[in-house]
Image: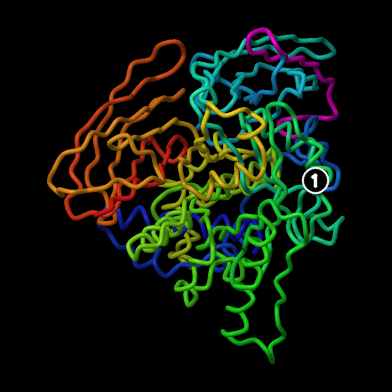
Amino acid sequence: MSKETKFLSIAIGLLQGIDRDEGKKDPVVESMNADRLYKFIQLVDESYVDKTARRTNEVDYPAKNDRNRFHFNGIIDRTAPLGNLFVETKINGHGTPAQVKLFKLLENETPENFDRVNGKITMIRDMTGFDGCLSRKLTPGRYVVEISKGSECEIITDDIEVVADALTKRSYELNRFVNLESEGWMAGELHHHSVYSSPAFNGDDDVVDTPQEIANSMMAMGLSFGALSDHHLILQHPAWKAMKRDNFVPIISKEISTSNGHVMAMGVPKDVIYAIPDDEHRTDEYLRNEFVRITDEIKENGGLAQINHPRDLQKSISWNPNFEDMLDIFETMEIWNGSNPMMSGSTNDAARDLWHRCMQRGLFLPATTGSDTHNICADDYHILFDRIMDTMDAIRGQKTELEKEYPEEVHTMLEIGDKLLPILEKWAETCLTSGCVRTYVYFDATQPREVTHNQAHILNLLRKGNSFLTNGPILIPRVSGKLPGERLKITDDKALFDVDLKILANRRLKTLGIWTENGLRREIKIKGHKENGFYDYSMSLQEAALDDNYMYFTVQDDCTNMAISNPVIFCR
């Protein structure tokens, strides 16, 4: 599936989800498919798009095999004189890796009226190095700068003027408003690809990022551990283990490709291989036995067996629905994959529904996230998005003519343009990179660091499910003192128990959701105050178990700023 077709498939699903949430049903959108829509877009692009007025110019984005990610991703005109930028990021006076986003201001934009949702992705994503320093070249002009480091630091915004053949220097002291590791929580990335998944190593994925660049990127997002999960091989394991730092634990991993889903083998030093049969021997019994064999092999070698993106758009990498009865062979489930937003109608939403259904039948598979990053700068998506926007302009300009022959395609594209592209633009500029979605796990902070911060212990923490998933907010619930993944004894279904919620965020939130196997029990509009660079929405509530068997929590503004906890399990 091409990037274009995948984007359109995601968009159609999200559009259908929006309609369902609004109690509507659009028969045109319901019957549309991505291949048909992509053919229409190709026609419009060829016949109506002004190539000289593209949002993305070929001079700005070099060809795939000529891309130097940290110097020529984003708005860069290599034919003009460039300016030099030096950025330093620190915490308590010491250099630290941090994410650096640079938004080149368009004509008529100023730092005061800048809005990232402006119909064009002008963002360049970069990061300071292990020493907290970044040096790069930029096209001259005015930029809005955003400095961030995950969930626990204030987001800093600034503006700079880059001048040709001159040096612009900035130094930023990051405000870490909470240190969750001191309270027993650490964040990690569980699904990331590197150049070892590329054709250079007989893979199929267009990835150029090295293990060192990826470790730097993960640490710039405030992560304490990370799994490098390439396809087909484990050649990257030595290079990844070499990324160990006092404040970062590398986890060796492999994403095993089968024809019925992707299986993660985390922490396994050997190459576990699923033997895909030829057509003659392809039976359900054989396929099931292979899944049992490889998950047994993973566990026997001290690893964690996880099912990845179980509801992906592509049949070959989505878990076979006929095999749902055997999901208990896995230890965790990736319900939130960073390649698409967590919205109604998304594959993540479908994975979350599968997770629910497992718990309804008594199977608790701790939920995890994984960014599934194939490009730490995400500039390939930026190119795609801008070209879709160019096509949208042409469709709107030629609407009357195009509707004569392609009324359903025009209708669907206009719906996508009006209802989806603004939030997808915001999502692309907020969420696409290493650790864009992350899993926080709870550990015993009274234990020595060498006990808690190692691969085997972290895998065990993931198995327990004492965790929450986030692309921004901190969400730590305690139900009668019990954390997510723990069991609470219920003696009276109607008795009230105390719910204490620690909710902190470096961006505004709107709602708290209380969920059970019966769906959303209630949604609460939340208000918080900003102090010291963050919003505090923490609160205490009282709830009863009623007829439910578990309870978990969500907080969010929209799909770019949300968190989901694992459940507290009720026992009777």
SS label for mark 1: loop
Closer to the camera, 478 or 380? 478
Q: Which residues are magenta?
A: 73-94
Could one spot residue 53 in this view of the protein?
Answer: no
Which percent across, then down, holds residue 149? 60, 24
- The single residue placed furthest to the bottom in the displayed view is 280
Could one spot residue 395 in this view of the protein?
Answer: yes
- What's the image's color scheme? rainbow
Look at the image and say whether residue 554 sits in the magenta stretch: no
Q: Residues within 10 Å of mark 1 (few under 14, many from 20)?
A: many
**Residue at 68%, 58% in the rendered image:** 255
**Badge 1 is on which residue?**
208
Which percent across, then down, holds residue 312? 54, 62
- The image shows residue 190, relative to residue 2, as above or below, that is above
Q: Amino acid at mark 1?
A: Val
- The image shows residue 500, relative to residue 270, as above or below, that is above
